[in-house]
Amino acid sequence: MTRVRVAVDIGATPRQVWDSIEDVASHIEWMEDAVAIRFRSAQRKGVGTVFDCDTKVGPIRLVDRMEITEWSPRRAMGIRHVGLVTGTGRLLLRRRLRGGTRFTWDERLHFPWWMGGPVGGLVGRPVMQWIWRRSLRNLKRRVEARR
């Protein structure tokens, strides 16, 4: 298992941040590695929503099938990866004492043997952290611009 965790402080309330992430289809607008999202379930938000996310990291392209497993408005969104890469992820929002929101993206992923398994995860971890930090900066700009 490979764990990737990144966080950013956003100058907005948890409600304002949630308003920017609850539309899962809009994640391609701020996630650096997300190219397209296609819903596989009739619902588009909440627990039980299933979607495919086309991802691209350098020359590597894959379809990541995900299911939303937790939906706590203004607090957390949990997902389960059920495609080629498996595991769990969580987007966590916490109000900061000095104002704003601490947004944390935490993933625990298992890579298939042809992607190097645990060794591939270890090698890929710094790349994913770099990409996801850029994604969080994109989200921060997006949310703060809407305030």
Image (cartoon, rainbow, N blue to C red):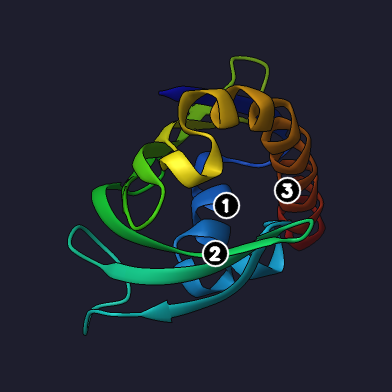
Residue at figure coordinates x 58%, y 71% from the top left: 26
Label 3's element? helix
Q: Badge 1 is on which residue?
A: 16
| Residue 95 in sight in this render | no
Q: Earlier in the sequence, mark 1 or mark 3?
A: 1
The nearer-to-camera label among 3 and 2 is 2
Q: Badge 3 is on which residue?
A: 135
Label 1's element? helix
Quarter of the image containing the C terminus?
bottom right
- Closer to the camera in the image, 77 or 146: 77
Q: Badge 2 is on which residue?
A: 62
Badge 3: few (under 14), some or many (20 or more) residues near its Cα, within 10 Å?
many
Q: Earlier in the sequence, mark 3 or mark 2?
A: 2
Query: In the image, is residue 42 above or below residue 131?
Result: below
Q: Position of residue 6 (x, y in %)?
A: 64, 27
Residue at figure coordinates x 32%, y 76% from the top left: 44
Looking at the image, which residue sits at the far front?
114
Q: Position of residue 36 (x, y in %)?
A: 58, 77
In whole angstroms, how far apart are the C-alphas of marks 1 and 3?
17 Å
Amino acid type for the residue under numbered disc 3: Ser
Amino acid type for the residue under numbered disc 1: Gln
